[in-house]
Every structure is written in structure tokens, then in C-alpha cells.
Image (cartoon, grey):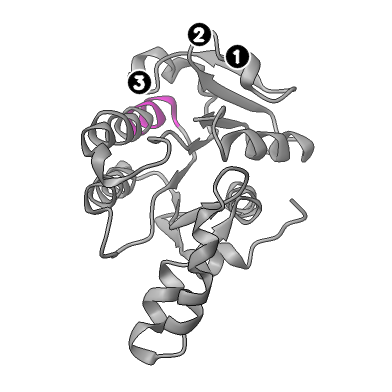
Amino acid sequence: MPRIFVTGGTGYVGRPLIAALIARGFEVRALVRRGSETRLPTGVTAVIGDALDASTFASAIPARATLVHLVGTPHPNPRKAAEFERVDLASIRASVTAAVSSGVRHLVYVSVAHPAPVMEAYIAVRIQGESMVQASGIPATVVRPWYVLGPGHYWPLVLVPLYAVLRWFPSTRAGADRLGLVTRRQMVATLVQAVQLPPAHGVTTLEVPQIRRADGGV
């Protein structure tokens, strides 16, 4: 099985993803800031570095590995536009640079569903990230959730009745499906499946309806 390198491994999706990969027998390395090693799941190899600087971690990525990029601004909202540029964009730029120099065989990038009428700055940065991934020439999987439900992230459940109404009308059905809610369990299952089934070439994009169908026993 391919070796896995994860950025953002101490985060909301990163921790359960690493645990799921290790449970399946994958060898996982995770990039962390010094002092955050204890926040990683048991069984992962910590790589100390800066997610915004490829030179600090590129040499630790195994050749022919799969790189899963999860770094991003926590709890994104429209007031964090500058942070999206500083963290989200800079980190995917660094990951792509490191992936190319280390001979990564597969890139997995968590982007965001679009188009959408809100979060324009966030979406713009993630679209730039997708462009960088595609320009790398490395076979890639781009995953586009909108909002990921889970511990501490349940407030959008109040919107479920609205989504149900929007799906009744042909003019709004596609948007409601594209910008629907997914669970953290579904995201982890989707990412595990992406790791297990890399594309031979080009970029495979997984939207909300595909994420919702993921299970994989996670």
C-alpha cells in the first residue's frame, strides 16, 4: 500500500482520517508544528515542520507517497479573507511544491463546493488551490464539501428544512445538492477511498452527492 503524508493532521478531519488509515494498515506521516506532536493519533510518525514552507518538510515525504492536504483556516467566515490568503493559499502552494520535488504519486486536496452566493474570498482561494494541484501534473483527487457536520459543528442542522424545500424546485435543486451538508464520517470515508483508489492521471473531483454516498466502514 502507498505511504501517506498528511498536512493538517491534528485538525477536525485530520485526526479521525489518520486513525482510519492506520487501522487499515497504512504507514502514515503527519506534518505538525513543534509541540503539537501529542495531538496526533497513536501510530503515526510526526514530521516537524511549517506547512507554509515546503523546504521544512519536502524531504520527509516518501517517494511515491500519497499526500493529503488538509491545512486550512478553522471555522472560516467572510471576515477571515486575509487569513485565507496567508494560511490556506500559502499552505497548498507549499504542499504542491513539496509534492513535485519529492515525487508524490497522488495528491488529495480538500477544497470547497462552488459556485455559492457566500464565502467568496474562501472559495476564490480554494479555486486557486485546485489550479495549483492541476498544474502540478500529479494525479489528484479534489474533494469539495460545503459544511462538514460533527462534534462542535452542528449548527447548520437548523437549515435542513430549508434544504428540503429547495430540493422540491427544479431551479434550486442542483444548488441545494451541491451545497448540501455532509458528516465528518462521510468525509473521512471519502478521503480513505480516495487514498485507496487514486486516479491513473488527471484530476478526479468529488462533490457533495458523492461524499454523501461514502461509507467504507469508517
Q: Which of 190 and 58 is in front in this view?
A: 190
In this view, 46 is above or below 104 = above
In this view, 200 is above or below 74 = below
Residue 23 visible in the current orientation? yes
> Residue 191, which numbered label?
none
Specify few, some or many for label 3: CA neighbours under 10 Å numbering under 14, 14-19, or 20 or more: many
Label 1 or label 3, whichever lies nearer to me, is: 1
Q: In which quarter of the image is the N terminus?
A: top right
Circles 1 and 3 in contact, beta carbons < 8 Å: no
Q: Earlier in the sequence, mark 2 or mark 3?
A: 2
Name the residue tied to disc 2.
Answer: 34
- Which residue lies at the image location 35% right of the left edge and 20% below the top edge? 54
Q: Which amino acid type corresponds to the residue marked 3 in the rendered image? A: Ala
Q: Nearer the viewer, residue 109 or 147?
A: 147
- Which residue lies at the image location 45% right of the left edge and 59% below the top edge? 204
Name the residue tied to disc 1.
Answer: 37
What's drawn in magenta, residue-wise? 96-103
Q: In this view, does 194 lie to the left or right of 86?
A: right
- Which residue lies at the image location 52% right of the left edge and 54% below the top edge? 155
Q: Which amino acid type corresponds to the residue marked 1 in the rendered image? A: Glu
Name the residue tied to disc 3.
Answer: 54
